[in-house]
Each structure stands twice: as C-alpha cells, then as structure tokens.
Amino acid sequence: MEDATSHVRLFYIKAAQKELQRSISIEEIVSSIYGQLLLSPELGGLYQLKEMKEYNQAASYYRISAAGCLQRMACGDWHETLLSLLVTSLYQAKNQDHLRWKKIQSIWLEAPKGFQSCIDNFLCWLTVTQEHVKQTMILSQQLIGTKTWLQFMPHS
C-alpha cells in the first residue's frame, strides 16, 4: 500500500512543480515588462511604479521558496515546518499578486496613453501567473491533505 501512496505523492509533487515552474517562467516576463516600464522616462518617476518593486521581489521569493519546498518533498523531506513553509509561501505569492494587480491598475489610470497597452500586457501576464499559483495551491493541498493544508493556512 505504501508504494501506491508514494506513487500518488510523486504524481502530485510533479504536477505541482510543473504548475509552479510555469508561474516562475511567467514571472520572468512580468519582471521584464516591469523593468521596461520603470526605465521609461514618462513612467519611471511614478511613485506607484517604484513601490511595486517590493511586491515583485516578494512574489518571486515566495514562488521560489515554494518550489524549493516541493523539491525537498520529492526527495522525501516531509517535515512539518517544510509543509508549513510551502502553504505559507503559496498564500504569500497569491497575496503579492493581488497587491501588484491593485498597484498596476492605479498606474494604468495615470499612464500616458502610449503605455496603457504595455500595462495591459503586464496585467495579462500577471493573470496567467496567478492562475498557475492557484493550480499549484490546489495540487499542493491534494498532496499534503486538506487537514494539514488548513492547519498551516494563514488566518487573516
């Protein structure tokens, strides 16, 4: 029976890793669009844009932390604190995405018309990366079990 459980765990780990890796790859695109906006003389001085740097860094950090957790779990490390870090990191990544979404929408309202399409592109990619985080969360919850997931889920 343990072999079947190990096989199912491995399936969910690989599926969660795949979704999270897609999100991380899209973060590269989001970061490049952000850098482009930041370097634009017409937008670079916007306070909200400079403020977004912190959200972008945090979103990437939490995705990478969650990816590291999944890698360690694939190697057999299932310590309770690691599971807690996985759940917390995914929720924090989701939260940072929400903060970025709100911030970039306010920037869109202030941006010159020529930049709104670039910001729309940013929003589009941000939506895609968010969906991959959500899928990673679903798969991770199935992986560790709902009871464990709820135990480590941040309460706010």
Image (cartoon, rainbow, N blue to C red):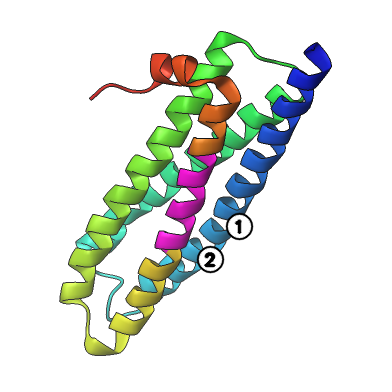
**Which residue is denoted by mark 1 in the rendering?**
25
**Which residue is denoted by mark 2 in the rendering?**
29
Left or right relative to 67: residue 2 = right
Quadrant, the C terminus: top left
Where is residue 35? Give x, y as percent: 45, 67
> Does residue 46 show up?
no
Residue 92 sits above or below residue 130 on the image: above
Residue drawn at the location 38% of the way across and 22% of the way down: 153
Residue drawn at the location 72% of the way across and 27% of the way down: 8
> Could you say whether the residue bearing mark 2 is in a helix, strand or loop?
helix
For the residue marked with disc 2, what is the amino acid?
Ile
Q: Residues within 10 Å of mark 1 (few under 14, many from 20)?
A: few
Quadrant, the N terminus: top right
The reply to whether discs 2 and 1 touch (Cβ–Cβ < 8 Å) is yes
> Does residue 70 show up?
yes
* Residue 127 shown in magenta: yes
